[in-house]
Amino acid sequence: MFYLEDLDFNNLYVIGDNDNDYEMLQKFKGGVITNHHKILDELNKKEFDSLHEFIKYVEK
């Protein structure tokens, strides 16, 4: 979709909580849900208690 609309990937933020989110979290800005798979600790991403908290952070 980003390619179709010619959007800037620097404006894409993601949040993850499971091991299948590892690659996505490596490529894009974002964070993890506080209760996440331990492998995501390797990425040193900011933790959020909820999606709502993450959205408020991104909006700043």
Image (cartoon, grey):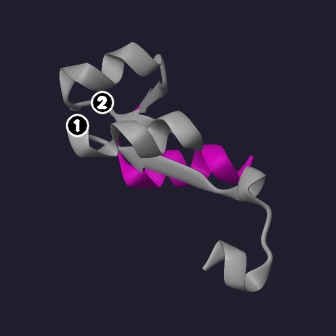
Above or below residue 50? Residue 26 is: above
**32 or 59, which lies in front?**
32
In-front residue for pair 59/3 = 3
Q: Amino acid at mark 2?
A: Thr
The magenta stretch spans residue 22: no
Q: Residue at x 59, y 44 (%)?
A: 28
Residue 35: percent from the left, percent from the top?
21, 31
Q: Which residue is mark 1?
A: 19
Residue indicated by mark 2: 34
In the rendered image, residue 47, in percent from the top left (x then y), is placed at 42, 28
Spatial separation of the CA atoms under disc 2 and disc 1: 14 Å
Residue 29: which quarter of the image?
top right
Task: Rate crowding at label 2 as few (under 14), some (14 to 19) or many (20 or more) other CA atoms within 10 Å.
Answer: few
44 sits to left or right of 17: right
- Which SS class for mark 1? helix
The prevailing secondary structure element of the residues shown in magenta is helix
Name the residue rendered at 47%, 39% in the picture. 25
- Relative to 48, does residue 24 appear above or below in the rendering? below
Please name which of the two marks, 2 or 1, marks the residue nearer to the observer.
Answer: 1
Q: State which region is magenta.
A: 48-60
Residue 54 falls within the magenta-colored stretch: yes
Q: Secondary structure at mark 2?
A: loop
Drawn side of residue 7 relative to residue 35, left or right: right
- Kind of residue at disc 1: Asp
On the image, the x and y values in percent for residue 34 come to 30, 30
